[in-house]
Image (tube, coloured by chain):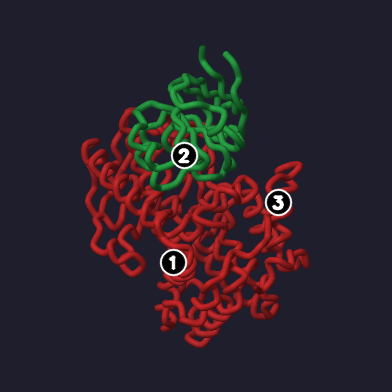
Chain colours: A red, B green
Amino acid sequence: MPWIDQILDSFGNAISASDSAGWSPFNPFLLFPYYAKPWMDKLWTAYEKSQEKGFAPADLTKCFLGPLFLRQGISEIMFFSKICDYDKEKTTKILNWFNDILVSKCTEDPYGFNSTKILTKEDVAYLLKMFPFRPVEESEAKEAGKLIHACEELSWSYYFDWIYWQCFEIYGPYELPNNRKLLLRAFTDLAPGELWPHAKGFEPSTVYIYTIYENTDIKLDFWSHVITRDSLPQKMTHLMIIEHGKIFTTKEQLVELRKKIEIAAVMQGKRLAELSFEDLKTREITTRHYAFRDLFKKLELDWKPTSEILKTVKGKQLVNYKFPSSFETQEKKKEFWKKLHDPSDPFFPTELKNA
Amino acid sequence: MKKLIKGTPAANGNAEGIAHVITKEEDYEHFKEGEILVVRITDPTMTIIMNKASGIICDIGGIGSHPAIIARELGIPCIVNTKSGTKIIKTGTKIYLDATKGDVYAVD
């Protein structure tokens, strides 16, 4: 199966389990039509620069936190290109470029059918040997779950729940002996001062939460969401937390951090909720540019959005298109979203075309 | 037990407890440890009360939505897509949440 069909299939699996009515603070697909063309132009410029500078895809993998970023980036490029009928040859080159970077970074299951892995077996063995994973009882495992939750909410409230991919990634599940599995959660930018000035200097700016589970059916989907029928705290056997370079050795440290991040998430959630619609739209575009800043900086491009691209949404309402809210089957929902994104499929609602 | 509502199972398990319907931020401060959170959909401002909840029931959402993801990390049951849980379930009602089947019952 060609790679595009594979990634569309994996994307379709994930998005058919989601509910667009729950996307907050608004459905981003209804804002994309305004700025699709200038955003595609920016990505094309980035592609041309990378070719001009002779960067191989493997040279650019560090510009993206994880496979999630690249997968989501690819799905969005497909959608953006259909909005503005972007030049097909350019679109194909951009898509292939991102795919080449993705498969350089993630050789096993790059499209996220079941996992998000970038480490080899040897890397994992080394990690387990070098880092002091602590055995945990369920009560501490539950505390770890609350910390994970708080970190995720803080990420979503800084970056919207659809552009957090350069702040938050989950890697795994890595198979271990005795029917155990390892997940590595990385929260790498919890102090985005360039996006939210008040966040500058927030500590910790990074939190890593590594967990081992036993006898569980854990998988990760296209968006590195943990999919399981199990209660994760009940299945957790070992834990390691690194806060800003410091390894935790006690449950009390975990609880203290959890409380701090909870408060930060609530306050940040309030700030987001109190923004005007005009601010939200500007912020959406700025956050998207910020997500790609490492790539743009490496290519010596200004990461900040131009005034022209910000003007495309000024004074505008979300486009007037109602996504279908119910489907006969999940399979039909999956097919709808695949067709919507598939560059080779002409299906695309006129309401979502260039606004 | 009388079945109150049905939704989509999103995180397995069962819980019995007092329902607490949250429709505005002013409701948050009254949410008690162990109550079952009933909301339209969760958001970051609810981080602390979600960490206190013994279960989550949402009017909207899918099995890949945030409340589902979070509930699995917390190890608590979650039902989404009830359509009108926040209208039908009343704060203070003792309820039983069967998230394996997606059913919510009033406990007599």
Q: Answer few, some or many: residues within 10 Å of disc 1's Cα (few below 14, many 20 plus, some between 14 and 19).
A: few
Disc number lying in front (1 or 3): 1
User: Which residue is tagged 3?
Assistant: A324
Task: Quadrant for residue A8, please give it.
Answer: bottom right
User: Which residue is tagged 2?
Assistant: B23
Q: Disc 1 to disc 3, how far (Cα)?
A: 28 Å
User: Which residue is tagged 1?
Assistant: A279
Residue found at x 51% / y 20%: B96
Q: Indicate the secondary structure of the residue bearing disc 1.
A: helix
Vertical relation: A59 (above or below) B75: below
Measuring from the top left, give residue A276's x and y in whole percent. Answer: 44, 62
Task: Quadrant for residue A77, please give it.
Answer: bottom right
Does residue A82 show up? no
Query: Left or right of A58: which side holds A297?
Result: left
Residue found at x 46% / y 27%: B91
Measuring from the top left, give residue A120's x and y in whole percent. Answer: 45, 54
Q: Indicate the secondary structure of the residue bearing disc 3.
A: loop
- Output the chain of dot 2: B
Vertical relation: B87 (above or below) A320: above
Total labels: the figure holds: 3
The disc, 1 or 3, on the residue closer to the chain's N-terminal end is: 1
Residue found at x 53% / y 64%: A70
Q: Indicate the secondary structure of the residue bearing disc 2.
A: loop
Measuring from the top left, give residue A355's x and y in whole percent. Answer: 65, 73
Image marks 2 and 1: residues in contact by CB distance under 8 Å: no
